[in-house]
Image: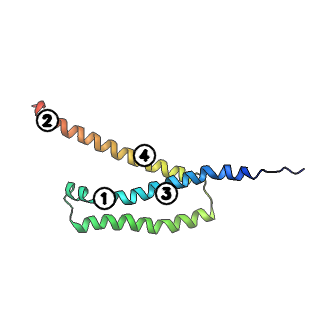
Amino acid sequence: MTTLVSPALPRQAALPVLVALSITHLLNDMIQSLIPAIYPIIKASYHLDYIQVGLITLSFQASASLLQPVVGFVTDRRPMPYSMVVGMAASLVGTTSAICSYALTRTIATRSYSPATE
């Protein structure tokens, strides 16, 4: 007994994967262009010099350059289909916690030093 598989089935299965990969690649490229764009803000806010800003760039780019081949080698040997979902969820949690902590700090600082509280 042979079952025929329609040629549309692999295309339908590949489309969600292709869309997910495209979106994560877009987000990765956006992050890589966002960090250098906020260097002046980071430099002014934390009173950094150019060497420290350069070290931020070095750590960001070096970690990506060193980790990508390792992760590629491991996933080629042992496929992990949900690793992309886990990675995106971790990025979402990290970004959300950073935004929430910034908003909380800003709110506390504004209310603490507001003239209306005196």
Residue sitting nearer the eye, 77 or 85: 85
Q: Which residue is mark 1?
A: 37
| Mark drawn on residue 25 | 3
Kindly identify which residue carries mark 4.
93
Regarding mark 3 in the picture, which secondary structure is present there?
Answer: helix
Where residue 111 sits, quadrant-wise, is top left
Q: Which residue is mark 2?
A: 114
Q: Earlier in the sequence, mark 3 or mark 4?
A: 3
First in sequence: mark 1 or mark 4?
Answer: 1
Which label lies toward us, 1 or 4? 1
What is the crowding at mark 3: few (fewer than 14 residues within 10 Å), some, or many (at least 20)? few
Tell which circle, 1 or 2, labels the residue nearer the N-terminal end: 1
Q: Is residue 101 above or below residue 42?
A: above
Q: Classify residue 33 as left or right of residue 7.
A: left
Which circle's residue, 3 or 2, is located before the other in the chain?
A: 3
Q: Could you give the CA–CA distance between mark 1 and mark 3, rounded to whole angstroms?
A: 19 Å
